[in-house]
Image: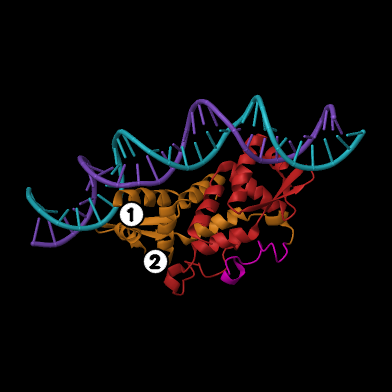
Chain colours: A red, B orange, C cyan, D purple
Amino acid sequence: MNADAVIRALGALAQEHRLAAYRLLVQAGPEGLAAGAVAQGLGVPASSMSFHLAQLANAGLVLARRQSRSIIYAADYAAMSALMAYMTENCCGGAECGPDVACSSPLLQAKDVA
Amino acid sequence: MNADAVIRALGALAQEHRLAAYRLLVQAGPEGLAAGAVAQGLGVPASSMSFHLAQLANAGLVLARRQSRSIIYAADYAAMSALMAYMTENCCGGAECGPDVACSSPLLQAKDVA
DNA sequence: TTGATATTTCCATAATCATCGAATCATGGG
DNA sequence: CCCATGATTCGATGATTATGGAAATATCAA
């Protein structure tokens, strides 16, 4: 993953409706949700949601597939992992990080997180 | 961490110079770097870099402390962890995620990541 | 106090982004 | 073919953001 892709991904997530849509899709799991279901679930007009979902897809954060008349969006979990890897790459210059730094230990243990 | 804080953090990182600065600070470790060192390291005018560092600080991603004439910025590693936790919260609706989904397993193992 | 260094604030300009109704495109049933 | 449904594209408007030189603010040394 290069800087440009990372910036697109972060930019895609840095917006109220897109962040909410992404979380909805993360919670929906690999099955995904139809575009209309996302729009309705978030109370956003279809054309606006379409714009936002397209941005998420373009950023590589979600995958779209057509299923009959619906277009199903699903979170791409690997993309999120790649994002985090990029941010924390070569943390502390490769030195062993202390427990307070915690960039080499498994992140995202809910208890460790503010 | 609430949605607003997450959006500010993601928005702060979704910019070429800020992403580069943040990575530089992550790699620098807890000691941090002076504002001028970051600007010089990235070849960005001081006033522009100051603007960007202020955004990172405002988003809670970096910590600033004065040391004599310099202002030292350092990555706040906990903030990044909180960010990821928010994104993957209640992944797959709480069901056990498969190995291909990997949102409940330790992320950021470089080998698992694209 | 004077001078040098480090950083930030100010400001105007340029560029990018979000919104959403209406029109358009794609699919499938009868 | 015709109609209904689900989704995207278009387009104009308003809002936010990035840029960098010049001026202002802090700190320190002599």
A78 shown above or below B53: below
**Percent position of residue A101, x then y:** 47, 66
**Percent position of residue B63, x then y:** 40, 56
Q: Residues within 10 Å of mark 2 (few under 14, many from 20)?
A: many
Q: Would residue A44 be visible to someone looking at this image?
A: no
**Percent position of residue C7, x then y:** 29, 53
**Residue identifier under label 1:** B44
State which chain disc 2 sits on. B
Q: Amino acid at mark 1?
A: Val
* Residue at figure coordinates x 33%, y 54% from the top left: B44
User: Along the line of sight, which residue is nearer the eye, A104 or A80?
Assistant: A80
* Residue at figure coordinates x 55%, y 59% from the top left: A83
Q: Secondary structure at mark 2?
A: helix
Q: Amino acid at mark 2?
A: Ala
**Residue identifier under label 2:** B28
**A87 displayed left or right of A24:** left
**N-terminal label among 1 and 2:** 2
State which chain disc 1 sits on. B
Q: Secondary structure at mark 1?
A: loop
Q: Would residue B23 be visible to someone looking at this image?
A: yes
B103 magenta-colored: yes
B108 shown above or below A75: below
A70 shown above or below A93: above
Quarter occupied by residue B40 = bottom left
* Residue at figure coordinates x 75%, y 53% from the top left: A31
User: Along the line of sight, which residue is nearer the eye, B32 or B46?
Assistant: B46
Q: State which region is magenta.
A: B97-114
**Distance of label 1 from label 2 (alpha carbons):** 18 Å
**D27 displayed left or right of B77:** left
